[in-house]
Image (cartoon, rainbow, N blue to C red):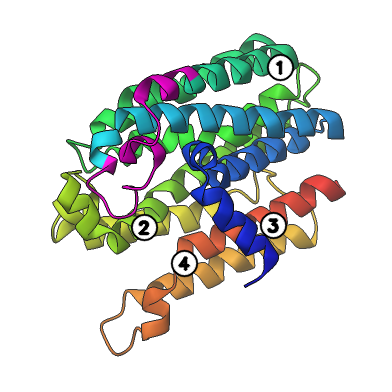
Amino acid sequence: MMPHREIAQALDRFAPAALLRWRVALMAGLSTALGALLAGASASVGAGALVVGMLLCMGCSVFNQVQERRIDALMERTRNRPLASGALCPGTGLVLGGLLTIAALAGCALLGGVPALVAALVVPLLYNGMYTPLKRVSPHAILVGGIPGAMPPLLGWLLAGPLVPPESVYGIGALFAVYYLWQVPHFWCLAEKRRSDYARAGLAVAPVRMGRRYGLARTFWTAAFIAGLAASVPLGVVPDGPLRYAVLVLALLSGLAAAVQSLPRPLGTAFLRRFRVADAAMAAFLVLVSFGAVSG
């Protein structure tokens, strides 16, 4: 086993690290830093955005685990989380979540002022205040949860401060839309794999509750995400030149892969049926956007 994998697994077993969900937090932090770089921020502001994004994600995650500790205890995937297993008490989680969130909000106020602070406040209000309780009753909860999930790039853009070029608002708006449209097929793909877990816990996720309508809904949201990729090009999410053509080619290939997936067996190959088109396309898209932000 590679050393970095051993380190990652050790962190996952370490109660505080598991509580903070460091992998998800790192992705949120990198997305926040990307938003700052797209606004033309300096490397130091980008680093600050990385830290703020991670702190905010960690705080929301801890609060979420306090809220869902009894549900987590019913699911195979989450039953060993510190709060679900009883390794840590809810009071500890509340204190830690509060400290992390306050630190993130303070960082937002210092770096980006009131606009960044307001945007940061939206994240726990929607994620912990609305999305988390809605998951128990509605298969459409992800439509709310997708908003805080798409906030990191926008937050990073706001953290760049008042000197942000006005024309960059179209690019960051397009990036926010792509992030939002990706959230739905991404979460539903994960929910398909964990269908029995969610059913056991009584969570109203789409693969469990929507029945025959689920396939059509998944196709719609995957198509919307791919359309969002293509639409982001004229809005300036990547600079003029080869990168724009690369994003268009990516959208085309993603559409073809999604179309093959929807074919009846055996035309839709087993490999493509297991292939997570939206996740692969999003990863490639972010590589292209990051390259454009750094090189630009």
Mark sitting earlier along the chain (4/3): 4
Q: Residue at x 26, y 86 (%)?
A: 265
Magenta stretch, residue numbers: 72-95
Classify mark 1: helix, strand or loop: helix
Label 1 vs label 3: CA separation? 25 Å
Label 4 Cα neighbours within 10 Å, binned few <14 / some 14-19 / many ≥20? many
Amino acid on which disc 1 is placed: Gly
How many numbered marks appear? 4
Amino acid on which disc 3 is placed: Val
Mark 2 highlights which residue? 190
Label 2 vs label 3: CA separation? 22 Å
Q: Is residue 80 magenta?
A: yes
Q: Is residue 225 above or below residue 268?
A: above
Q: Residue at x 59, y 34 (%)?
A: 152
Task: List x then y, in percent, for residue 113.
Answer: 69, 11
Numbered tag placed on residue 112 in the rendering: 1
Q: Is residue 78 visible?
A: yes
Q: Residue at x 86, y 50 (%)?
A: 295
Numbered tag placed on residue 287 in the rendering: 3
Instruction: Specify whether 156 is left or right of 64.
Output: right
